[in-house]
Amino acid sequence: MIAYKLIKSRRLTALINLRMAFPEKSEEEIEKIAKKSFKIMIKAFLCSLWFDKYLNDPKNIKIVNQESMENAYKKGRGVMAATMHMGNMEASTVSAGKHKIITVAKKQRNPYINDYITKLRGKADYMEVIEKNERTSRVLISKLKEKKIYALFSDHRDKGAIVNFFGKEAKAPSGAISMALKFNIPFVLVYNTFNDDNTITVYVTDEIKLKRTDNFKEDVQNNVQYLINIMEDVIRKYPEQWMWFHDRWNSFRE
């Protein structure tokens, strides 16, 4: 695959991450997963360029356990939906059904791609996208009163909590867990996989019951770790679907 060969830094990062996550696998197995992961992420990027048309065609999407999202939403407090960098990431939004979504997205480095994707997302009247910056947390908290579905990536490196991820220390975002705990918002995990026929299967977990004590800081730490454990199980089941070419372990790398 041309992209896999050309983007050397990303390829090396993916291979390093995979060796850390799966020390028991052979180099041949590691390389096979890395190549498949690159292929899926390129397909996902291409789909994102016309995602509204693609996602609105019911032939392209199958949703597993959507009733979990509906049951959580019926509680009347909104839903906190942790999402993952796997499969076609935009596709997880269909799990919201007819409900409105608020999500956060980084600004793309390429201004032309950023403007194009922003324009497409703007046409999706069911979704409000907040650009990630130093004010993101405050903006999100101010919008919790709208009781929508809040879709937040929760699997990649970010400030928040220090967790055990594939047996190694890693940083993990804690925003989704913190807000769900503080404001008593039902919590689910949503992820999806690209199928061989280019259709997508979106999975919604049963509501994740967060553990609460009288120590909020410890509750955040323990529940972030709990969520990370669930996501690790998902990644182990579908390793080729996850985005391995980000520097996931960073300064904790041995």
Image: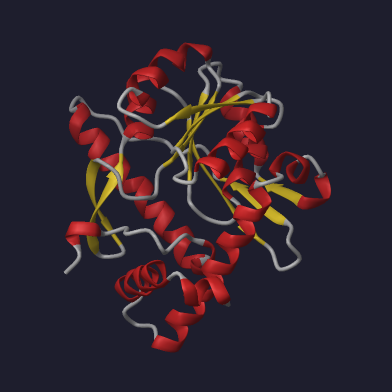
Q: Quadrant of residue 165?
A: bottom left
Q: Is residue 242 left or right of residue 247?
A: right
Q: Position of residue 176 (x, y in %)?
A: 38, 33
249 on left or right of 92: left
Q: Which residue is painted at 57% across and 36% down in the image?
A: 115
Q: How is the image coloured?
A: secondary structure
Give the image quarter of residue 9: bottom left
Quadrant where the image shows the C terminus: bottom left
Q: Position of residue 59 (x, y in %)?
A: 83, 50
Q: Name the residue rendered at 59%, 24% in the picture.
A: 73
Q: Residue at x 48, y 73 (%)?
A: 6
181, above or below 228, in the image:
above
Residue 203 place in picture, x, y as percent = 61, 49
Residue 29: x, y in percent? 46, 84
Q: Quadrant of the N terminus?
A: bottom right
Q: Pick the residue in front: 93 or 115.
A: 115
Q: Nearer the viewer, residue 136 or 181?
A: 136
Q: Examine the rendered structure and indicate whether residue 205 appears above or below residue 137.
A: below
Residue at figure coordinates x 45%, y 16% from the top left: 144
- Of 45 and 55, the residue lying toward us: 45
Report how many numbered discs are placed on residues in the image: 0
